[in-house]
């Protein structure tokens, strides 16, 4: 690319993307709110995870030769 193309591309990008006016930062610190939210709800796996685990255990119980395949993909 020569300088003319670079200048043209820069100008087109500046026209396409509006300038951010004002303060781009949030008005307050969000990290304490994140910590409160994490502490409020204990992380419990959803029922779908338990169903997948039960299916995997059942599959391995019926097809024990599949154990090395699952270990390979871990």
Image (cartoon, rainbow, N blue to C red):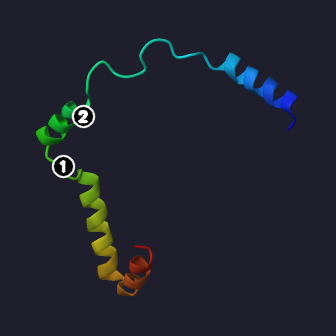
Residue 31 circle label: 2
The residue most toward the bottom is 65
State the residue at coordinates (13%, 41%).
39
State the residue at coordinates (40%, 82%).
66
State the residue at coordinates (80%, 31%).
6
The foreground one among 32 and 43 is: 32
Q: Earlier in the sequence, mark 2 or mark 1?
A: 2
Please, is residue 62 above or below residue 23 in the view? below
Q: Quadrant of the C terminus?
A: bottom left
The foreground one among 11 and 34 is: 11
Question: Helix, strand, or loop for circle 2?
Answer: helix
Image coordinates for residue 70, horizontal then vertical, percent: 40, 77
Image coordinates for residue 48, horizontal then vertical, percent: 28, 53
Image coordinates for residue 8, horizontal then vertical, percent: 81, 24
The residue most toward the top is 22
Please, is residue 71 above or below residue 17 in the view? below
């Amino acid at each position: 690319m020569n300088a003319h193309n670079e200048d043209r591309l820069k100008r087109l990008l500046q026209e396409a993307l509006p300038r951010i006016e004002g303060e781009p930062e949030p008005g307050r610190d969000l990290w304490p709110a994140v910590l409160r939210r994490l502490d409020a709800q204990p992380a419990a796996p959803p029922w779908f995870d338990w169903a997948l685990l039960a299916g995997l255990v059942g599959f391995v119980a019926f097809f024990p030769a599949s154990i090395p395949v699952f270990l390979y993909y871990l």
